[in-house]
Image: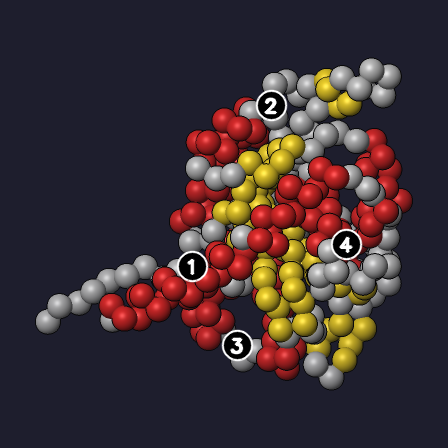
Amino acid sequence: IEVGLVEMSQRERAAFMDKTGREPGLAASANDIAHVVAVLSGKGGVGKSSVAALVAVALRRRKMRVGVLDADITGPSIPTMFGLHEQPSMSPLGVLPVETETGIKVMSINLLLQSEDQAVIWRGPLISSVIKQFWKDVAWGKLDYLVVDLPPGTSDASLTVMQSIPLSGVVLVTSPQDLAGMVVRKAAQMAQKMGAPIIGLVENMSYVTCPDCGKEIQVFGPSQAMQTAVRLGVPLLGRLPLDSELACRCDAGEIEGYETSLLDPIVEPLVSHVPDFLLGAEQEQAFQHERR
């Protein structure tokens, strides 16, 4: 008897993990989410959450139905950037995400705490359980894109997302320092091992534009973006500058009012190529099914 061994794709693994867990609630059965895009960095401090929020804003400006799942349970910042402070309400289907001024649906642990300054001091299994609940028990409804803001690193929380949620693709975020590039390569290796397609790399805080002469000043040294992208074998989606206006708008909860054309080349692959990633995953599953 010949026994063929094949490795599960990321989407097959997520479906398997979903079946082996508890029964999904009404929300999971009613949700209709076309694409799930995770934003991942190797280390903290590179602006991953702000990139995730900006991606959601840019997609919403293209008339997409967008949600943001804040999976950074111990360091949530998404609600503050969008100026959200009210607690989610309940519906017969499950927890209703809070909506921003432009209609982006957001779920974060910070929306459930008595105070946004309250620390979440939990071990990995509890954090993983909450992330699964944000996926299964939140009534997201019909979305074109759900952007998942992952915590930095390659530990439990990121692993839970890649094992339990059918990702359409991953956007990697780094900064110019070679140290950040080294760590993001670890995150990329994790995504590849888990079978999650990498859409591309974004270098954040690449430079500061001088307000007087317009010259680009490389505060953190020369850009390593292209070298990192080449080593990973992924597209360089774009380079974002250090911008005091963005920082002020994030602090004020006004990120939806931030304007920049630099997001267009970053978001365009999400709109044009993510369906291709999905099609490729479906073709792979069909091929593996035929082999069996």
Quick check: 18 left or right of 102?
A: left
Front tag of 1 and 3: 1
Q: Residue furthest bottom?
A: 92
Q: Nearer the viewer, residue 244 or 280?
A: 280
The CA span between labels 1 and 4 is 27 Å
Residue at disc 3, secondary structure: loop
Q: Position of residue 196 (x, y in %)?
A: 47, 53
- Alpha-carbon neighbours of circle 1 within 10 Å: few (<14), some, or many (≥20)? few
Residue type pointed to by label 2: Ser
The first of marks 2 and 4 along the sequence is: 4
Give the mark, 4 or 3, whose residue is nearer the N terminus: 3
**Label 4, on which residue?**
61
Q: Which residue is mark 1?
A: 280
User: In this orientation, which residue lies closer to the viewer: 127 or 107?
Assistant: 107
Residue 75 visible, this angle: no
Q: Of tags 2 and 4, which is closer to the observer?
A: 4
Residue that mark 3 sits on: 22
Look at the numbered disc 2 and give the secondary structure of its residue.
loop
State the residue at coordinates (49%, 61%).
Answer: 278
